[in-house]
Image: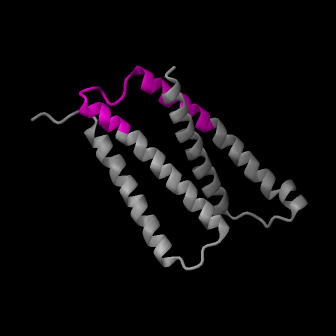
């Protein structure tokens, strides 16, 4: 029996989603008291995992129907979402500089650590990508 094209991608995507969920469960089980920053970060991670899983399951549905995992429109939408995510990443990094600098001084926000900045850039740009992907996929242009 011929292995369907793209199933490796689906298997890897689902495997990563399962590993992240298991990691979140272990983290939450051993975390004790969680502050608001960690709670927000967990919500973003959960939303990213759910979004990525939906994208992977949609591709798996296409493969099961005998369609290619990506077509020209899906590839175009993927590139558009990636472009929006790239520009959002730049502006998120600039916002982190402002929050750590003049805005933080004005409102008395303590200095951001590298972990805060990296988490904000990665999670927010990931959310922009997932949101853009769903928007372009639904719009169909």
Q: Is residue 8 above or below residue 62?
A: below
Residue at x 57% of width, y 54% of height: 44
Residue 68 is a magenta residue = yes
Image coordinates of residue 130 in percent, x first then y, are: 53, 41
Which residue ends up furthest to the right in the rendered image? 106
* 63 displayed left or right of 1: right
Residue 87, position as x, y percentages in the image: 65, 36
Determine which quarter of the picture holds residue 113: bottom right
x and y, in percent, of residue 137 in the image: 48, 29
- Residue extending furthest left? 1
Residue at image location 70% in from the left, 48% down from the top: 93
Looking at the picture, does residue 95 appear above or below residue 43?
Answer: above
- Image quarter hosting the N terminus: top left
Q: Position of residue 61 (x, y in %)?
A: 31, 35
Decide: is 38 above or below 96.
Answer: below
What's drawn in magenta, residue-wise?
Answer: 58-86
Quick check: 51 above or below 106?
Answer: above
Q: How many circles with numbers are drawn on the protein?
A: 0
The residue at the far front in this view is 138
Q: Quadrant of residue 104?
A: bottom right
Q: Is residue 120 left or right of residue 8?
A: right
Q: Is residue 74 left or right of residue 36?
A: left
User: Residue at (24%, 34%) from the top-left corner?
Assistant: 64
Q: Nearer the viewer, residue 13 or 89?
A: 13
For the point 61% across and 33% down, which residue is it? 84
Q: Is residue 43 magenta?
A: no
Query: How are the colours assigned in the image?
Result: one colour
Q: Is residue 5 left or right of residue 53?
A: left
Q: Main secondary structure of the magenta part?
A: helix
């Amino acid at each position: 029996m011929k292995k369907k094209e793209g199933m490796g991608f689906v298997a890897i995507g689902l495997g990563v989603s399962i590993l992240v969920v298991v990691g979140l469960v272990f983290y939450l089980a051993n975390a004790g008291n969680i502050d608001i920053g960690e709670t927000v970060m967990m919500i973003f991670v959960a939303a990213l995992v759910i979004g990525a899983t939906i994208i992977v399951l949609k591709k798996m549905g296409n493969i099961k129907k005998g369609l290619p995992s990506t077509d020209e429109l899906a590839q175009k939408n993927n590139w558009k979402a990636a472009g929006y995510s790239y520009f959002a990443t730049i502006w998120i990094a600039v916002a982190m500089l402002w929050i750590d600098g003049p805005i933080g001084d004005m409102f008395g926000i303590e200095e951001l650590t590298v972990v805060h900045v990296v988490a904000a850039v990665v999670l927010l740009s990931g959310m922009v990508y997932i949101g853009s992907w769903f928007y372009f996929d639904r719009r169909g242009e």
